[in-house]
Amino acid sequence: MALCNNCGKKIPDEATYCPYCGASVQSVTGMPIDQSQVMGPQSIRPSIVTYVTILFFIFGIFSLFSLDVFSLIIGGLELVAGYGLWTLKKWSRSLGIVLAAYGVFSAIVTLILVAYYPSDIPTGSSLEIYLFSAAIQLVIYAFILWLLFRPNLKAAFMR
């Protein structure tokens, strides 16, 4: 079986288009692409991986400024996931999915608790700021989760 030059997945030798991403499997001259001359999917970091890595590094650094132990642990794990994603370690995508799912869950719980118990917000803090920050967290972590399931990102971590 040949490998798709675009997404890196295995495709039948007789295929003219990749069944996964739709890319043409033939070169400009019409001759099949010599797979021995094509770089493997692990050797190229898609730009989508760079975006997710940067987001994990940002969240990890901000979490390290927290004073509670659990946030420090999550921040450390986000930095580890960012490093693993940057170096295309297979385990880092799974860790990123778990951390992003936790981020979505945490944001939803925060939105619910702040909406139902606004009196529990510390003195001097604004209800709007809590709601806004939880909503931003929800959007960003949902976006990260969506990116981690994109076919070209998954292909970068297949070995």
Image (tube, rainbow, N blue to C red):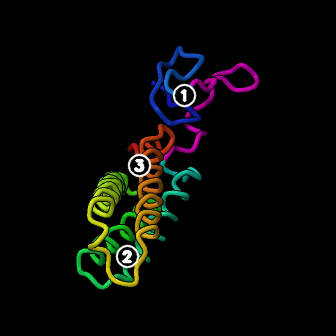
Q: Residues within 10 Å of mark 3 (few under 14, many from 20)?
A: many
Provide the residue designation for mark 2: 63
Sequence-wise, the earlier of marks 2 and 1 is 1
24 within the magenta span = yes
Residue depicted at x 45% and y 28%: 10
| Quarter holding residue 154 | top left
Quadrant in the picture for the C terminus: top left
> Is label 1 in a helix, a strand or a loop?
loop
> Which amino acid type corresponds to the residue marked 2 in the rendered image?
Ser
Secondary structure mostly seen in magenta is loop
Is residue 116 or residue 84 the one in the foreground? Answer: 116
> Which amino acid type corresponds to the residue marked 3 in the rendered image?
Leu
Residue 152: tell me if it is visible.
yes
Residue positioned most to the left: 69
Disc 3 vs disc 1: which is toward the camera?
3
**Mark 2 and mark 3: span between their CA atoms?**
19 Å
Q: Is residue 40 left or right of residue 78?
A: right
Residue 72 in percent (x, y) is at: 30, 78
Provide the residue designation for mark 3: 145
Measured along the vertical axis of the image, is residue 49 above or below residue 6? below
**Mark 3 and mark 1: span between their CA atoms?**
20 Å
Residue 132 in percent (x, y) is at: 47, 63
Measured along the vertical axis of the image, is residue 107 above or below residue 2? below
Magenta range: 22-41
Q: Residues within 10 Å of mark 1 (few under 14, many from 20)?
A: some
Q: Residues within 10 Å of mark 2 (few under 14, many from 20)?
A: many
> Which amino acid type corresponds to the residue marked 1 in the rendered image?
Cys
Sequence-wise, the earlier of marks 3 and 1 is 1
Mark number, residue 133: none
